[in-house]
Image (cartoon, rainbow, N blue to C red):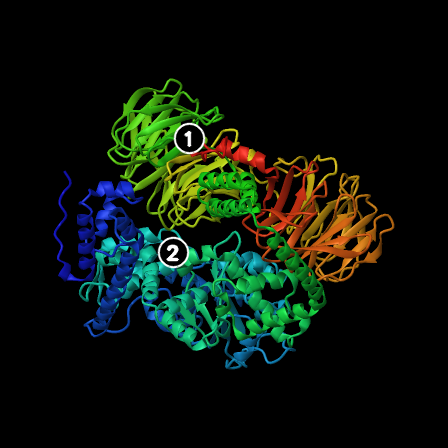
């Protein structure tokens, strides 16, 4: 029987009142046991009971889980939680005020997120050994670079260590040295000039005397955050001269010594400057992680100077939490400062105070969340805007802070923004310099979940605003030259972004002027074309009115109702496609059954074409926690909350058996390597071994008392290891069922385990972000690694054992070389915690699954996402890949298993956006080009690797086309040049020039004699292929003609451009015959079907529209791409349309709606099929 909760007095304080009200909510729900609440949520019973204990503030996520499980109002409790945060903050501020008047004099001994300055030298401890080495190296040489990861304490070492020591006479002979400290910023030469180190452009060396140093005295120049010469300074010549001036300090006659502070991940940038690279060979000092003793000194000594003691257990706990990660030092300092303010009494720092502020990894987030909770709605919007602007997104690496000029942050209300910045600065979240603002430390970016969510939600919008800001600044600096304005696609993208979600409020006056000038310039250029278009629209409107007048029968009224219902169902289907594939398919089939409207046709074609799952397996009566394929790939086992292990036939999707024997929810299943055994484990700690072929229970393993989360056979099948919520892992002998040994001493909750492929190591993960390495032969612990800042719940080894993938609550997948204990890469895509990992393709592909309802496929070599698999209606808990790599299985909260067929997935090859595709005339393969500058030749439509990859244009390729006889391939790139290639030999035959702007598209005439090219300059040029000469220029269309395609018979030419319309031309008459208007944004692709009856178009709105060439009506709209549709091409038989886009994928779409309906009905189970629609 569970113990009764300790009584709580709601009048004792805000925390106790909040906990009391949570208990009252549970009481109103019938006082369900905490185990029952845990079953309804993803939190443990202990976490939920702790939330109502009244001893510490619970997180918002666990609070809302508690509220949901008890049937409470989420909105109301969100407000109450925010009020609690604000009330506790006020109380803490009062304590701080009292502490300032207490017996403990002076300022706090710790600085929080900010770097230690020169005046903080009396509080700077723990780096004495490194400072001594730095001084010694500087006495021997005149130039030195201090490298270290972000958060390693470089700035503090240089400022509170080196500069303070130099001014105090420790550098040489007890004589104080004059010093200068600078950060490069956007104008590094200006920084030198400001301090008198250079006098003019003719100076070739630093002049210490100008900076105030006497003739017989040397000057110490410290350049902190040297990496800004690469990130903030965009003038290459100024960067080079600045570096050369710094290197002049190495001259024998120089009176200046230079020390650089450089982030370690910018060492490669330094190597790009030959003289700097040479200087660094013998003049580099690495700031590594502090030792345990150094950390202890940094904790204890500052407090001791103020007469305050530190609980030894607290020091040990902080040292453990910091681990060996240099980047955790700012969090460490911030947690200490928060602990200082939370101390009980004046004379001691305790572990209870440390835990109350959330420890190392919670302190920053708590402070940021507290400040955010105190802001008004308008202030919160402004805070999001300015913090995002101060964050630089980096592909394949951690996001970083970015100094931003204050003027760029002003937005629509500069005074309001300035007040907000002051508020953030007072909390030490941002730092205000003379004319720039920056995030105080990147620890805020990595540790505050709300900021991470903002970055995940709008990465492309952030990049777009940054590009716009840079372009507007360049336009302003060049006297607002018209040539610097956006046009075409760039203008369309910028306008679309500015008009979305009040983004225009984020624009500064120069940025608004820049966009408005671009709009006006483009409008003036297309005025003539617009007049013709208006005449055509008037005629179309008149015809539409006449047609409406002719309709008047009752049958038509019935059809109109059916059409309306069909459109409604189709819209629902498209909306549901991303989160419930089965329901979307059902709605689409219903829509087409009521009436084959264009919307219904588009829905069935879209969902059938983008439906990647092979089979949806249903039958569990609760969430699916684990999935595993048998070694022969024929059977899939799933573990359910309904206490059943289901065995599925992979080929047919039929459930062959259901194994019963567990009395609690089954959480994990695993096959032995030879396929003879199946093991399962449940939430009560029970492990059962089954005969996989017969479905009979062989034996039960006893000894675990906790909920089990991990289960794995050794590669030789002799051992079975299990891990649960406790602090032990048990390894069993499979043959006799006895315990071999227990892996204990981890020091925390264990969450998951995996054997290395060679069987020599067991890796066990924990909820503190560590993984421990054990020797499975004797059970000895070999080592441990800190792989994450939060709990790790998913592990996977690559088949060769070279890579360990780890992921969990921080949503980041980390790839490790555990042999060298080296972090290889971080993969970021999931927006909620990750719970499943699996390698395939010999380790080249990784699959992940998480609470965000998405499974993601990754190219491990390129460190990039390839495919997102959506369709689950709830969180995912497990993922597995069949041994042959064809099928992926995922199970989750929606009680279903999705079985994904990789043979029907998009083709992946390019590392960037796919710009264009074209099929060989004989149908045996196709060609593609992309922004990576490559021309790829593919064999067939299901090839996993290209046959040939050529560099078409190093700066990016835009278009590709085969000649009708297949002997020539034409490509274009950013340099506006048309290139003709021999596709079999991979040789360049000729180049054609004539366009004046980029974005050129090419298309051959049916007889192969002519080649049409169209570009952003608005011109459509016709070329004689044999003579390599221009033969005609079609009348200038609107700006940004980016695609031009001939019909099969050569009579028509379709062009598409920035206005979002398709123009159809009569080639012989050189005149326009039709305008197809339906996209909501600029177009990037257009093509004719082989029979000439259809036109397909696509662009920035991510959709594809099918048009009827005869009556110019819209036949269907296809949706499913996650980014711009940049290329379209029909297969030679006309049965399939292939699209490619900015999401790096090439997708085939079926074009016969009745076949698409049949396909969808086949995917739906009998119970899911809509009545009458699948008959």
Q: At x 54% / y 38%, what residue is drawn?
A: 608
Q: Residues within 10 Å of mark 1 (few under 14, many from 20)?
A: many
Q: What residue is disc 1 on?
A: 628
Q: At x 30% / y 28%, what residue is drawn?
A: 687
Placement of 627 over or under 1010, stated as above or below: above
Marks 1,2: beta carbons within 8 A: no
* Residue in front for this viewpoint, 472 or 728: 472
Residue 136 seen in the current view: yes
Residue 254 seen in the current view: no
Left or right: 1168 as drawn, with respect to 334? right
Left or right: 933 as drawn, with respect to 6? right
* Residue in front for this viewpoint, 484 or 500: 500
Spot the residue most to the front: 553
Placement of 660 over or under 223, stated as above or below: above
**Whole-percent x and y of residue 804?**
45, 40
The CA distance from mark 1 to mark 2 is 32 Å
Q: Quadrant of residue 41?
A: top left
Q: What residue is disc 2 on?
A: 449
**Whole-percent x and y of residue 1155?**
58, 34
**Whole-percent x and y of residue 466?**
54, 64
**Whole-percent x and y of residue 1056?**
68, 55
* Residue in front for this viewpoint, 793 or 1113: 1113
Spot the residue most to the right: 1027
Q: SS for tag 1?
A: strand
Q: SS for tag 2?
A: helix
| Disc on the earlier residue, 1 or 2 | 2
């Amino acid at each position: 029987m569970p113990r009764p909760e300790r009584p709580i007095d709601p009048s004792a304080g805000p925390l106790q009142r909040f906990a009391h009200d949570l208990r009252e909510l549970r009481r109103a729900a019938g006082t369900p046991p905490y185990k029952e609440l845990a079953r309804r949520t993803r939190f443990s019973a202990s976490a939920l009971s702790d939330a109502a204990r009244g001893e510490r503030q619970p997180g918002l996520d666990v609070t809302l889980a508690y509220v949901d499980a008890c049937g409470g109002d989420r909105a109301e409790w969100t407000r109450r939680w925010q009020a609690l945060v604000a009330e506790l903050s006020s109380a803490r501020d009062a304590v701080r005020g009292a502490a300032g008047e207490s017996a403990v004099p002076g300022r706090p001994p710790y600085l929080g997120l900010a770097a230690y300055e020169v005046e903080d030298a009396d509080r700077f401890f723990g780096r004495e050994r490194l400072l001594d080495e730095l001084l010694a190296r500087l006495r021997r040489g005149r130039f030195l670079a201090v490298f270290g990861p972000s958060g390693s304490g470089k700035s503090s070492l240089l400022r509170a260590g080196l500069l303070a020591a130099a001014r105090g006479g420790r550098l040489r002979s007890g004589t104080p040295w004059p010093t200068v400290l600078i950060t490069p910023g956007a104008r590094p030469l200006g920084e030198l000039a400001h301090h008198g180190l250079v006098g003019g452009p003719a100076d070739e060396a630093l002049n210490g005397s100008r900076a105030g140093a006497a003739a017989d005295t040397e000057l110490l120049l410290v350049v902190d955050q040297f990496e800004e010469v690469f990130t903030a300074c965009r003038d290459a010549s100024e960067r080079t001269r600045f570096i050369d001036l710094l290197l002049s300090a190495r001259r024998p006659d120089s009176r200046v010594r230079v020390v650089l502070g450089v982030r370690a991940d910018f060492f490669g940038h330094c190597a790009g400057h030959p003289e700097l690279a040479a200087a660094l060979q013998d003049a580099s000092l690495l700031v590594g992680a502090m030792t345990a003793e150094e950390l202890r000194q940094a904790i204890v000594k500052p407090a001791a100077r103020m007469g305050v003691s530190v609980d030894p257990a607290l020091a040990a706990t902080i040292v453990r939490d910091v681990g060996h990660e240099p980047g955790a030092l700012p969090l460490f300092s911030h947690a200490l400062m928060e602990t200082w303010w939370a101390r009980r009494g004046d004379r001691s720092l305790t572990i209870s105070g440390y835990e109350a502020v959330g420890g190392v990894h919670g302190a920053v987030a708590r402070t940021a969340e507290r400040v955010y909770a105190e802001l008004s709605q308008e202030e919160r919007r402004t805070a999001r805007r300015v913090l995002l602007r101060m964050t630089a997104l980096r592909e394949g690496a951690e996001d970083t802070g970015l100094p931003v000029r204050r003027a760029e942050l002003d937005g629509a209300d500069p005074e309001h923004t300035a007040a907000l910045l002051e508020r953030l600065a007072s909390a030490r979240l941002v730092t205000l310099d003379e004319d720039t603002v920056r995030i105080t430390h990147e620890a805020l970016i990595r540790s505050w979940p709300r900021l991470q969510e903002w970055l995940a939600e709008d990465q492309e919008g952030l990049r777009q605003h940054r590009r716009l800001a840079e372009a507007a600044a360049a336009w302003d600096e060049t006297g607002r030259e018209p040539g610097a304005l956006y046009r075409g696609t760039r203008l369309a993208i910028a306008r679309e972004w500015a008009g979305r979600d009040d983004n225009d409020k984020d624009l500064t006056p120069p940025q608004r002027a820049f966009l408005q000038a671009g709009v006006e310039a483009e409008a003036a250029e297309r005025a003539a074309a617009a007049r013709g278009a208006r005449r055509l629209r008037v005629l179309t409107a008149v015809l539409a009115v006449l047609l409406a007048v002719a309709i008047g029968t009752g049958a038509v009224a019935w059809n109109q109702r059916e059409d309306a219902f069909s459109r409604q169902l189709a819209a629902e289907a498209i909306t549901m496609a991303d989160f419930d594939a089965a329901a979307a398919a059902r709605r689409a089939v219903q829509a087409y059954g009521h009436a084959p409207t264009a919307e219904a046709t588009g829905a069935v074609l879209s969902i059938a074409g983008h439906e990647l799952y092979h089979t949806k397996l249903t039958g569990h009566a609760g969430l699916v926690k684990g999935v595993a394929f048998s070694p022969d790939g024929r059977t899939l086992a799933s573990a359910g909350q309904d206490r059943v292990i289901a065995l599925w036939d992979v080929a047919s999707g039929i459930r062959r058996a259901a194994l019963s024997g567990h009395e609690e929810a089954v959480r994990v299943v695993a096959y032995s390597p030879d396929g003879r055994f199946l093991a399962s484990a449940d939430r009560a700690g029970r492990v059962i071994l089954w005969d996989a072929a017969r479905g009979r229970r062989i034996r039960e393993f006893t000894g675990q008392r906790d909920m089990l989360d991990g289960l794995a056979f050794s590669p030789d099948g002799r051992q079975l290891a299990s891990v649960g919520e406790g602090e032990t892992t048990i390894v069993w002998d499979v043959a006799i069922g006895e315990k071999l040994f227990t892996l204990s001493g981890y020091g925390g909750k264990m969450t998951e385990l995996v054997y290395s492929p060679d069987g020599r190591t067991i890796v066990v993960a924990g909820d503190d972000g560590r993984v421990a390495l054990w020797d499975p032969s004797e059970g000895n612990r070999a080592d441990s690694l800190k792989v994450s800042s939060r709990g790790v719940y998913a592990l996977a080894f690559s088949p060769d054992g070279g890579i360990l993938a780890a992921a969990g609550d921080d949503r980041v997948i980390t790839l490790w070389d555990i042999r060298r204990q080296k972090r290889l890469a971080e993969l970021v895509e999931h927006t909620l915690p990750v719970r499943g990992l699996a390698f395939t393709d010999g380790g080249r592909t990784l699959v992940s699954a998480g609470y965000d309802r998405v499974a993601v496929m990754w190219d491990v070599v390129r460190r990039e996402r390839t495919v997102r698999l959506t369709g689950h209606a709830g969180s995912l808990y497990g993922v597995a890949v069949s041994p042959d790599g064809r099928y992926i299985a995922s199970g989750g909260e929606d009680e279903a298993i999705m079985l994904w067929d990789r043979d029907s997935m998009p083709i992946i090859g390019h590392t960037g956006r796919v710009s264009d595709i074209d099929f060989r005339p004989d149908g045996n393969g196709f060609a593609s080009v992309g922004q990576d500058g490559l021309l790829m030749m593919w064999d067939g439509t299901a090839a996993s690797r290209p046959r040939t990859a050529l560099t078409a244009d190093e700066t990016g390729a835009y278009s590709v086309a085969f000649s009708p006889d297949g002997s020539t391939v034409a490509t274009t790139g950013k340099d506006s040049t048309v290139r003709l290639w021999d596709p079999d030999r991979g040789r360049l035959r000729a180049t054609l020039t004539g366009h004046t702007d980029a974005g050129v598209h090419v298309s051959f005439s049916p007889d192969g004699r002519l080649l049409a090219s169209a570009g952003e300059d608005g011109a459509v040029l016709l070329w004689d292929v044999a003579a390599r000469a221009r033969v005609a220029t079609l009348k200038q269309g609107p700006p940004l003609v980016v695609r031009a395609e001939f019909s099969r018979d050569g009579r028509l030419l379709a062009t598409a451009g920035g206005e979002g319309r398709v123009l159809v031309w009569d080639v012989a008459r050189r005149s326009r015959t039709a305008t197809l208007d339906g996209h909501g944004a600029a177009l990037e692709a257009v093509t004719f079907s082989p029979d000439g009856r259809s036109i397909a178009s696509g662009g920035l709105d991510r959709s594809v529209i099918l048009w009827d060439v005869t009556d110019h009506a819209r036949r269907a709209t296809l949706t499913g791409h996650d980014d711009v549709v940049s290329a379209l091409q029909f297969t030679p038989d006309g049965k399939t349309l292939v699209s490619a886009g900015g999401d790096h994928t090439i997708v085939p779409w079926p074009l016969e709606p009745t076949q698409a309906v049949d396909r969808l009905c086949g995917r739906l189970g009998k119970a899911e099929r809509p009545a009458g629609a699948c008959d």
